[in-house]
Amino acid sequence: MSEELRAELWTVMAELLDDPAIPGAVAVMVRGPDRAVLAAGRSARGVGAPAVGTDTPFALGSVTKTFTALLLAELAARGDVRYADPIESYLPAGAAPRRGGGPPITLLDLATHSGGLPHLPRNVYRRGLRHWLADPYARYRAEDLYRATARLRSRRRTARYSTFGMGLLGTLLANAAGTDYVTLVTERVLTPLGMRHTGVPGTAALAAAEPATGHRRGRPVPHWTLDALAGAGALYTTGADLLRYLLAHLAPERTPLAAALDAVRRPHQRYEDGDNDVCLAWTHRVVGSRALLWHTGGTGGFTAFAGFGPDAAAGAAVLANAGPTRAEPVLRAGRRLLRRAVFPDR
């Protein structure tokens, strides 16, 4: 581990943890052959709470979407599915969307937020409204997801971010493989990358360490439970595993998932409301001569950032057990670390 990078991580982390609403965090940085992981703070508020370690699991929130996109790329590389497959190929009878004269929605459309799906299914609000701040997706089942999918009518060509679409993608890939999402992503992505401590609460992957407690405005909140939308935000990971994940994206040829990791970082089209492109889940922008890819995540009690610059062989990530706020201190810390990793001379 690089002491120079640890010092850079500590500079940012110390400022981040000055916020009393953020009990603990873990940060990761890679720059060429150097890498570092730094954990600080507590896994929960209060005297006697365990210290955060590099093996403490934190919720990834929407950074899970990058794992789902990588899962699609891996299945496609093996010929188990095709990017151009219409989504109805993996839906039960009666759940196919109405085409309305347009072309079918494909798996690639879902992975690039280009299928015209809204941010969330409309019926998720009815199911989760009473528990929106505590655990909004816990009661949203596969039958609810299929019902919402059957009501889709139109399709947009431009990219518009959709948790609905990525959650649906995770379910469809599990249907294609005849298993559930967590089992499939574990077998095809996490295990090959050596991410043995990434998973969901209650599974063997997280048995080695208790997940950090999430907090909203300084108060502890329950872990979110995602069922049918697991592919959009269910995973937890540790700082050590997140380092492995970044290294895999920076050197795909050193992993068993080389073709898939190469595929996820290719830009496909521009988001409709900005200057960023979308790859398979990852947001992409060229800054100077460097390509940057990143994703953010948040649940009721956690915030996450992960990004990398393949041209610079550099990356950074931050996980914290505090929910997103307007000030975005965790995301700002992540962006700052990514800039320091990719542009060390600036």
Image (spheres, rainbow, N blue to C red):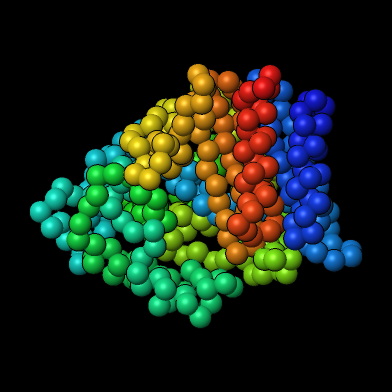
Which of the 4 image quadrants contains residue 240?
A: top right
Outermost residue, bottom direction?
130
Residue 7 to residue 207: above or below: above
- Residue at 71% from the left image edge and 41% from the top image edge: 27
Where does residue 293 sit, x and y in percent of width and height? Answer: 50, 34
Which of the 4 image quadrants contains residue 6?
A: top right
Outermost residue, left direction?
101
Residue 252 to residue 130: above or below: above
Total number of numbered labels? 0
- The answer to whether one can see residue 57 in this image is no
Outermost residue, right direction?
47
Residue 61 to residue 34: above or below: below
**Between residues 252 and 15, which one lies in front from this camera angle?**
15
For the N terminus, the image quarter is top right
Residue 327 to residue 70: above or below: below
Side of 87 where 289 appears, left or right: right
- The answer to whether one can see residue 213 in this image is yes
- Residue at 84% from the left image edge and 62% from the top image edge: 49
Where does residue 310 sit, x and y in percent of width and height? Answer: 53, 24
For the C terminus, the image quarter is top right
Side of 310 where 57 appears, left or right: right
Where does residue 272 sit, x and y in percent of width and height? Answer: 34, 44
- Residue at 34% from the left image edge and 59% from the top image edge: 118
Where does residue 172 sit, x and y in percent of width and height? Answer: 34, 54
